[in-house]
């Protein structure tokens, strides 16, 4: 696949997410989308990475703003990294799944050839075993039914590690964001 569009413009990779994507508590350039841009550039790929992360966002919020995030041009690649705030608020896994599926459908309506990566999230055990398992199953199910790529857990190796998270134990430090960028890049580079 060529790295540029036919008019020579860079292709668009949009990361639609919440505070983890936005880089809560950090400088914007420390958030994993900015770090992905550096990896894209180093690989010589002509993609512009857009950080469409909004702190506190849920899948319902993502669904409301996906058209805005994609803009008139849409995207060549879309990463959806939402759902963590749904889980922390106890929103039903069925509603979260429906919102994610609807986001994928809206994105594909704008560009049927768009490549989409769903980033999974997990809930802490204190949410109860039934909820934790139901929530964890959302992301692979959406990837399968909507024919998207899947990153099973966005915070793999970061979540729960005090050294890689800020004092709130929810939001990654700059070092944690670097680990997320490595994890995402390992999956994403094959999609570009």
Image (spheres, rainbow, N blue to C red):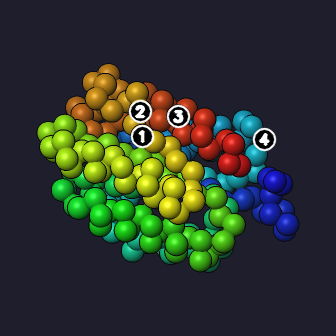
Q: Quadrant of the N terminus?
A: bottom right
Q: Earlier in the sequence, mark 1 or mark 4?
A: 4
The reply to whether callout 2 and callout 1 are in contact (CB within 8 Å) is yes
Image mark for residue 183: 3
Q: Earlier in the sequence, mark 4 or mark 3?
A: 4
Residue appearing at x 19%, y 47% in the figure: 130
Q: Nearer the viewer, residue 153 or 130?
A: 130
Residue appearing at x 55%, y 32% in the figure: 182
> Measured from the top left, where is residue 158 in percent x and y?
38, 30
CA–CA distance between discs 1 and 4? 27 Å
At mark 3, the secondary structure is helix
CA–CA distance between discs 2 and 1? 5 Å
Residue appearing at x 16%, y 44% in the figure: 127
Report which residue position mark 2 lands on.
156
Q: Relative to 53, say whether 190 is above or below.
A: above
Report which residue position mark 4 lands on.
44
Q: Is residue 21 visible?
A: no
Report which residue position mark 1 lands on.
153
Residue appearing at x 22%, y 38% in the figure: 124
């Amino acid at each position: 696949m060529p790295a540029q569009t036919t008019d020579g413009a860079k292709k668009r990779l949009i990361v639609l997410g919440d505070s983890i994507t936005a880089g809560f508590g950090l400088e914007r350039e420390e958030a994993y989308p900015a770090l992905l841009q550096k990896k894209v550039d180093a690989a010589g790929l002509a993609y512009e990475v857009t950080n469409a992360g909004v702190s506190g966002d849920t899948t319902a919020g993502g669904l409301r703003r996906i058209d805005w995030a994609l803009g008139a041009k849409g995207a060549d690649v879309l990463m959806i990294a939402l759902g963590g705030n749904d889980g922390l608020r106890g929103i039903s896994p069925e509603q979260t799944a429906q919102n994610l599926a609807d986001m994928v459908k809206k994105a594909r309506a704008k560009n049927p050839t768009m490549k989409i990566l769903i980033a999974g999230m997990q809930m802490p055990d204190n949410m109860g075993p039934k909820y934790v398992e139901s929530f964890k199953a959302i992301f692979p199910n959406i990837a399968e039914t909507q024919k998207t790529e899947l990153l099973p857990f966005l915070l793999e190796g970061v979540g729960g590690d005090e050294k890689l998270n800020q004092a709130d134990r929810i939001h990654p430090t700059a070092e944690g964001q670097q680990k997320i960028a490595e994890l995402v890049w390992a999956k994403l580079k094959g999609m570009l």
